[in-house]
Structures are given as C-alpha cells and as structure tokens.
C-alpha cells in the first residue's frame, strides 16, 4: 500500500515549469489536476517548500497561484507536486482570543492550535431557500448607526470610506462595542487585507488593551505580505465565522478591511494571467468573486447562530461609481458612508446619516427589540436634519435675516445634531435607550408643530 501511494505521489510531481509571471507559474504536461488543488513547489537549494494552489487548468497545463513570493524561482530544477487536497483551515473554539497571519498561521506566540476539525476555506454562498430573514438588532454603541441606520443580525452592511478618513478607528470601535442585547454568545472575526504595519499594530493594540480580544479572532494581512494571501484572508475569516455561528451557536460579526486592497490583488493576478480587463482594469468576474464573499453572511433556518458582515472599502477619489463600491452596493444591503465634510469639522465618527442606508433597519427595531419609539424618532431626526441643512444652505445665499423662525430653529438643531448625536467620541459607548433619549432632547429645539413623523402619544410620553 505504501509503495502504491509513493508511486501515485511521484506521478503527480513535475519538473515542467513552463513560465513564471508575477505570482503565477505555468506547469505543462500535467494530468488529473483539479481547480483549487494545493501545490507544493520545491526550489533547488531551498529546504522549505513553497505553497500554491491551482488557479486554472486547460488541456495539459495548470496555472498555479503562489502563496509565497516567486523570487528565485526558475523554470529549470523546480519541482511541482500536486497534493490532491484543497486549502483548509483547522478550527476550534480555542481560536477565540488568538491572532493569526492572513494565511492562518499563529502570530501571537500562543503556540500551534489543536484543531477540532479541518474545513475547506472556499465555502459557498448560503442557499437562498435555507435563509431566514434577518430580524434582530445588533447594538454597536454608536448613535448614528444604532438609531439612524440600524444593523441587523445576518445583514451585510459595508462602510464606504475614502483616503485619510478614520474608518480604521470606526472599525475598531464597532468591534469593541458591538453586542446582541439578548445576552446570547457573541464573537468578532476581524480580518485585514493589505493594510500598513501601523494599522495592523493599531488593531492588535486596540483589541488587546480593551479586552475585546477574548471574544475575537484576528487575521492580519499587511501590504508587505504576498498578494495571493490577500485573496485567502477573507475566506479564512468567513470559514472560522461559519464554524462559530453554525456549529457553536454564536452570533458572529465579521469585519473585513480593506476590500479595495482585496480587489487590487484580484486585478494584479488577473493582469498576470493576461486576461482581458474589464472596467478600470479590474477583471470581468469581480462581481461574481465579491458575491462569493458577501453572500456567506446570513441567518440559516434551524441554526441558532448568525453571521453579520461589515466589509470596509476606500473609494478612490471618493467616487461611489468606482467599480469596487459600485459592485459592492449591488450585492449588499445598504452602506455606511464616512463624510469628509464632517471629518473636516473634527467630528467622530463622521457618519453621513443622509448618505447612509440600511435596507433591513425596520426588521430590527421596535418594542421587544429596541424601543417602541425608535422608528418615529429616526424618521423625525432625518426630516428635521434635512430641513436644517437645506435652511443652512439657503442662509448662505440669502442671509440669515431672510429666514423664518422655524428655519433658524432647524439650523440650530442641525448644528447640535452633528455635535451631540453624530459625534460622540472614540471611547463613548451609548445604549440604544441613551441614543434615543439624546434624539428626543434635540427635538425640543424645533417647533412642536413640525414634529409630524412621530405619533402624538409618543411626543407626550418622551418629549418632556
């Protein structure tokens, strides 16, 4: 039996590397090779084997995507062995409190993990038939999210940011503060892709210093790590999230940053394969590829746990029509938008509540979930803030003297809304009741007859 196994392995080992292009190598004369199969590459003069996976097969050739750099790799004297296995990660509940590289190796000095089982990282989108509609509230402790654009368990709701905006601080705050109000088990899976060393160190420090690491699993891929590892990182994170949610009955929030770097890695690999480029040079299949990540969030019938996703992406030139935010918006259920204007005013978190949207917010609010007045307060705050911003713009053109008393009251409300409701500080955590009470206090600033979005009995009960 051992002899037969040895002969089988030998027959799958080749020295026929035809070309090396960036992170890709092409091997000719291969037989029986399958997509996503793991590959071991032995370079002459090196003891350690380099790993890769099969990206494409046609006729007798295989395109191998390397996880390690291809420096020093030559077409001669290089052995390629096809293992017959796909990329897997060992999972265990002991992963909570641990930090890993973007490739899944321990990074915290805690030693090797003893896995309960091994799972294929490719995963699959949740079958629409088996999905259950998301309808429970996740409290982030941030008023502009909890009240105005409520996050619901099982939802995928990205953050659209731009260069130089504090999305990293916002992501860390959400990860520290997020919880389910029903007291069930809650976990965070946090993955970075192509971030700077400073950002990776910031996230690590924040999780360790605040104690959030105890309920979290971190995967840190930096800009210095191999491009191909960047493709693996979100899939490793989601595989761990699926294990915790659907096998350990936990509610899991997955934060992925930065999806723009992920898409840049896709573009680089596509270019190395000499594929016909799509919009702005990105591969034509990027929409499909992104959907294989985003659609792994949700709530499954018969399972107690859920997976909620917050992907974070930076929009080049703050352009929402750029392919990355554009395609992300088609797949996900709304977005949080980071405002450059609010950030310039020194407000944090600078969430643009008018530009943001949570399409499932109504499913997560109301008596028994948040509070009976939530929907009415949200609608009234939106309406009053919109009137105030419009009156503010009008005052610039016509002068404040030309405005009515109601317009001036709404301008004062808009200013106070930004300073006391949207802005709350990086370390300030608010319960949903706190946030709603702040909203009611602000609504005292506008004329009573303009409160048309809240029921009169709610006004009598809460507007004291």
Image (tube, rainbow, N blue to C red):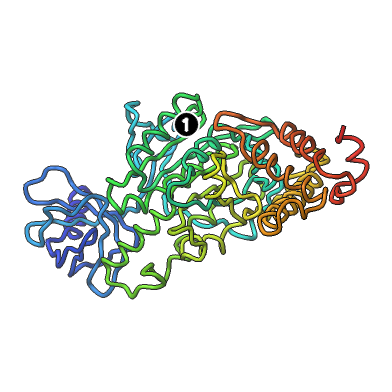
Categorize mark 1 by other alpha carbons within 10 Å: few (<14), some (14-19), many (20+).
some
Which image quadrant for residue 456? Answer: top right
Q: Is residue 79 above or below residue 248?
A: below
Question: Where is residue 459 drawn, in percent x and y?
Answer: 89, 40
Q: In the structure shown, which secondary structural element does the residue marked by tag 1 occupy?
A: loop
Question: Foreground residue, 267 or 65?
Answer: 267
Question: Where is residue 128 drawn, in percent x and y?
Answer: 62, 60
Which image quadrant for residue 177? Answer: top right
Question: Where is residue 124 drawn, in percent x and y?
Answer: 49, 56
Tell me: 77 left or right of 318: left
Label 1, on which residue?
96
Residue at x 62% of width, y 30% of height: 429
Residue at x 10% of width, y 62% of height: 75
Residue at x 65% of width, y 32% of height: 184
Q: Which quarter of the rendering shows the C terminus? A: top right
Which image quadrant for residue 181? Answer: top right
Q: Is residue 373 above or below residue 389?
A: above
Tell me: 210 left or right of 406: left
Question: Where is residue 90 drawn, in percent x and y?
Answer: 39, 40
Q: Is residue 303 above or below residue 333?
A: above
Count of numbered circles on the image: 1
Tell me: 238 left or right of 42: right
């Amino acid at each position: 039996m051992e002899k037969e196994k040895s002969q089988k392995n030998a027959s799958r080992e080749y020295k026929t590397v035809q070309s090396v292009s960036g992170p890709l190598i092409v091997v000719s004369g291969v037989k029986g090779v399958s997509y996503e199969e793991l590959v071991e590459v032995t370079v002459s003069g090196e003891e350690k084997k380099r790993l890769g996976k099969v990206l494409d097969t046609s006729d007798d050739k295989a395109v191998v995507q390397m996880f390690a750099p291809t420096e020093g790799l030559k077409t001669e004297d290089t052995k390629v062995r096809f293992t017959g296995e796909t990329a897997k990660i060992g999972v265990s509940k002991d992963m909570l409190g641990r930090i890993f590289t973007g490739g899944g190796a321990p990074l915290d000095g805690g030693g090797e993990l003893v896995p309960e089982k091994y799972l294929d990282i490719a995963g699959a989108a949740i079958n629409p038939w088996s999905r259950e509609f998301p309808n429970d509230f996740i409290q982030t402790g941030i008023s502009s999210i909890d009240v105005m654009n409520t996050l619901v368990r099982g939802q995928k709701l990205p953050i659209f940011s731009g260069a130089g905006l504090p999305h990293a601080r916002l992501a860390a705050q959400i990860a520290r503060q997020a919880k389910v109000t029903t007291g069930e088990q809650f976990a965070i899976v946090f993955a970075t892709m192509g971030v700077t060393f400073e950002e990776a160190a910031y996230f690590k420090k924040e999780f360790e210093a605040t104690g959030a690491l105890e309920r979290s699993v971190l995967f840190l891929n930096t800009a210095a790590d191999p491009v191909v590892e960047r493709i693996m990182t979100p899939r490793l994170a989601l595989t761990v999230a699926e294990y915790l949610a659907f096998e350990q009955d936990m509610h899991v929030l997955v934060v992925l940053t930065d999806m723009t770097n992920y898409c840049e890695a896709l573009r680089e690999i596509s270019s190395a394969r000499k594929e016909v480029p799509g919009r702005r040079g990105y591969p034509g299949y990027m929409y499909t590829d992104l959907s294989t990540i985003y659609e792994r969030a949700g709530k499954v019938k018969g399972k107690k746990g859920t997976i909620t996703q917050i992907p974070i992406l930076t929009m080049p030139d703050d352009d929402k029509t750029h392919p990355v935010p554009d395609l992300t918006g088609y797949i996900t259920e709304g977005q949080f938008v980071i405002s450059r204007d609010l950030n310039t005013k020194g407000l944090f978190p600078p969430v643009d509540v008018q530009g943001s949207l949570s399409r499932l917010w109504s499913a997560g609010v109301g008596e028994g979930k948040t509070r009976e007045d939530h929907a009415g307060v949200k609608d009234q705050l939106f309406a009053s803030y919109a009137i105030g911003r419009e009156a503010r713009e009008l005052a610039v053109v016509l002068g404040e003297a030309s405005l009515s008393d109601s317009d001036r009251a709404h301008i004062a409300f808009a200013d106070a809304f930004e300073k006391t409701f949207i802005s709350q500080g990086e370390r300030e955590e608010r319960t949903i009741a706190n946030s709603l009470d702040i909203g009611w206090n602000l609504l005292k600033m506008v004329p009573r007859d303009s409160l048309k979005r809240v029921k009169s009995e709610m006004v009598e009960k809460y507007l004291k």
